[in-house]
Amino acid sequence: MTVRGIGTWYRYWSRRSGVNEHHPAEGPVDASPEGQSAPLTSSPIGAPTASHGRAAFHVEPPVSQPPRPATILTVANQKGGVGKTTTAVSLAAALAELGFRVLLVDLDPQGNATSGVGLRARVEAYTIYDALVEEGDIGETIEVTAIPNLYVVPANLDLAGAEIELVSAFNREQKLRRVLDPIRPAFDLIIVDCPPSLGLLTVNALSAGDGVIVPIQCEYFALEGLGALRRNTDLIRAQLNPSLQIVGFVLTMLDARTRLSQQVVEEVRTHFGDLVFNTRIPRSVRLAEAPGFGQPITVFDPASRGAMAYRRLADEVLQRLDLNANGHSQEHLQEGVG
Ligand SMILES: Nc1ncnc2c1ncn2[C@@H]1O[C@H](COP(=O)(O)OP(=O)(O)OP(=O)(O)O)[C@@H](O)[C@H]1O
Ligand SMILES: [Mg+2]
């Protein structure tokens, strides 16, 4: 389903950046006319987002237009099993479907985002661990997926040691930001899937992010731990990353028929007001089945309720980031919340 991404990604990146950079493993630089002088590829930012059709965006910007660094979105909640990975994968796929160049970064040793887009979290694979802890080249970790415009930096169990191994590292909270910096211009959006903890990996993801999306499962104790997450977000904003904002809280696994779900919706709304996305993700068997097939819901069952919900969420996220306007997204995020 997927192919190893090193050569492909480097060729892709060098075409975009026009630097003819290539990875040694690739052999000689592609000598085809396309490989040598292709203009910067299209960025949909600036184009309308009304259509969900594939390849809806093919706007060729002028060659002189510098690529804008990707907006980094972190999907976090230290509570386990609330829908972080499902949200990260589905949102990434919905945005890629719109034509945005999306990089999904798996920052969870469980590797669920990796397998969710069809890659096996192989032991021998070159992963985020190598870039984060071993100071390897992030470009070499990027793999292409079967979904157009969607790339992934995989994770596997190696990453479980990172929390401890990073402790002694210089500026350990900012490592991910530094690792992602050089590749930001190659993408429109980078989506980071966090593990269920508030440890160093999540702190790194929050320090790197422009925005955080918090999935909340419509269950008992839905708000549990969110105070700690908000305090952490405040601390990180104050000390490490002033541009970090909460983009929104998204209610997941909603069963609209139950009183409990309705209660949770009301409670979350009371606490977080307009920060709660209007889009609610329904509990759906198809969403639960999709990871088993290594496909995001938008591919696994494009017309399903889950797929439609995540497309609506993608629209809302784009609106909140103001990614259709010119100018930097952070300037348009809501101030003073977190
Ligand atoms: N809307 C949904 N409807 C039905 N099942 C869902 C839905 N969202 C997620 N699931 C399922 O619930 C489980 C937990 O979801 P997911 O892995 O996305 O949560 P998570 O927060 O990433 O978990 P972890 O904290 O372990 O990383 C998975 O089996 C997933 O397939
Ligand atoms: Mg997960």
Image (spheres, grey):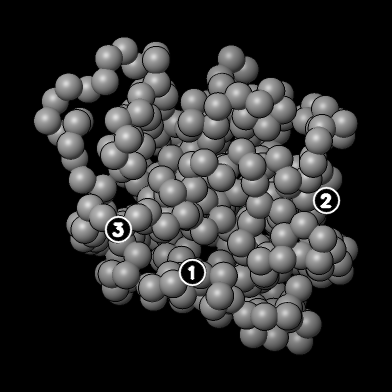
Q: Residues within 10 Å of mark 1 (few under 14, many from 20)?
A: some
> Residue 117 at x, y = what percent?
47, 39
Q: Please name which of the two marks, 1 or 3, marks the residue nearer to the observer.
A: 3
Q: Quadrant of residue 61?
A: bottom left
> Residue 332 at x, y = what percent?
54, 78
Residue 220 shows in this picture: no
Residue nearer the viewer, 40 or 259: 40
Q: CA distance from mark 2 to mark 1?
A: 28 Å
Q: Residue at x 82, y 32 (%)?
A: 169
- Residue occupied by mark 2: 198
Residue nearer the viewer, 278 or 95: 95
Q: Is residue 143 left or right of residue 193?
A: left
Q: How many marks?
A: 3
- Residue occupied by mark 1: 328
Secondary structure, mark 3, is loop
Residue 199 shows in this picture: yes
As shown in the figure, which amino acid type bears the numbered disc 1? His
Q: Please name which of the two marks, 2 or 1, marks the residue nearer to the observer.
A: 1
Residue 281 sits above or below residue 134 on the image: below
Dot label at residue 90: none
Quarter in which the N terminus is drawn: top left
C-beta proximity under 8 Å, tags 1 and 3:
no
As shown in the figure, which amino acid type bears the numbered disc 3? Gln
Secondary structure, mark 1, is loop
Q: CA distance from mark 2 to mark 3?
A: 39 Å
- Residue occupied by mark 3: 65
**Mark found first going from the N terminus, 2 or 1:** 2
